[in-house]
Amino acid sequence: MSGNLVVLPTPDALAEHVASWLTERARSSSGAFRLVLSGGHTPAPLYARLASSPWRDRFPWHRTEFYWGDERCVPGDDPESNSGMARRQLLAHVPVAPDHVHPIPGEMAPPGAAAAYEQMLRDVYGAPALDPARPLFDVTLLGLGDDGHTASLFPGTEALAERARWVTTARPEGKTPRVTLTYPALESSRCVAFLVAGESKTSILRRVRGGASDAPAARLRPVGEYVWFVDRAAAGEEAER
């Protein structure tokens, strides 16, 4: 499943387009709007856009709930923290209620953080098993690593095989330990949207969209819509199709 491809000319145009798309998506929903945020460098301009006019004044902050796809096991004020980045770029500048923000507790030991976050998600969902007809999230934002990882589902890690748990730990070689949503939780979304920018992503983007079996991002099978928002540099030859 390759998903729809939307190519924008520059990273700035990418951020502006997705800010508009996400705002309209949230405004057209009813009830709580559950949004999963991604970490990394690519979504930072999007978050800054959402925190500025006109999107800050249009977005339904009062009924939006924020979650995270993964987190490094560091305190929230650490420069590597995904929730810390989102707070600096977005959440500190918009009128969102504190009890609508649900960061992964990166300051906890990884197993405890994973268990706590999973229990919170199960409480929010209100059922022991995910139903494809009733997704857990409305929109899940994801990035794409040079090695094909998404969230903290890295090649060769045990997290790739986890289908019972909604949240688990990940210990990619040479990297900070992580807590990540598993495939079942990431897939339980009305829309999964990848954000990809930069020429360094051209090769892996082509491979993932081609179904490369060794790339974790290529194994994702969302129950809802699936879209790729990419800049022209990342799209490469696909931008000409």
Image: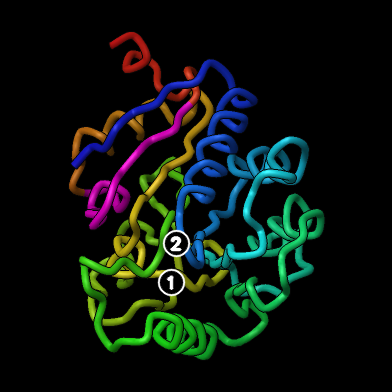
Left or right, 109 with respect to 207, comes to: right
Q: CA distance from mark 2 to mark 1?
A: 7 Å
225 magenta-colored = yes
Q: What quarter of the picture does the N terminus occupy?
A: top left
The range drawn in magenta is: 214-230
Amino acid under disc 2: Ser
- Quadrant for residue 203, please give it: top left
Amino acid under disc 1: Ala
Residue with the mark numbered 2: 152
- Residue visible at 50% across and 24% down? 231
Residue 154: mark in rendering: none
Above or below residue 65? Residue 105 is: below
Task: Give coordinates of residue 182: x percent, y percent.
Answer: 34, 69
Q: Secondary structure at mark 2?
A: loop
Q: Are marks 2 and 1 in contact (CB under 8 Å)?
A: yes
Task: Give coordinates of residue 93: x percent, y percent.
Answer: 81, 54
Task: Return the residue nearer the eye: 77 or 191.
Answer: 191
Residue with the mark numbered 1: 170
- Residue visible at 39% across and 51% down? 149
Task: Return the residue nearer the eye: 188 or 58.
Answer: 58
- Residue visible at 69% across and 60% down? 80
Task: Give coordinates of residue 240: x percent, y percent.
Answer: 33, 9
223 magenta-colored = yes
Task: Give coordinates of residue 126: x percent, y percent.
Answer: 37, 86
Above or below residue 186? Residue 107 is: below
Task: Return the residue nearer the eye: 27 or 195.
Answer: 27
Q: Residues within 10 Å of mark 1 (few under 14, many from 20)?
A: many
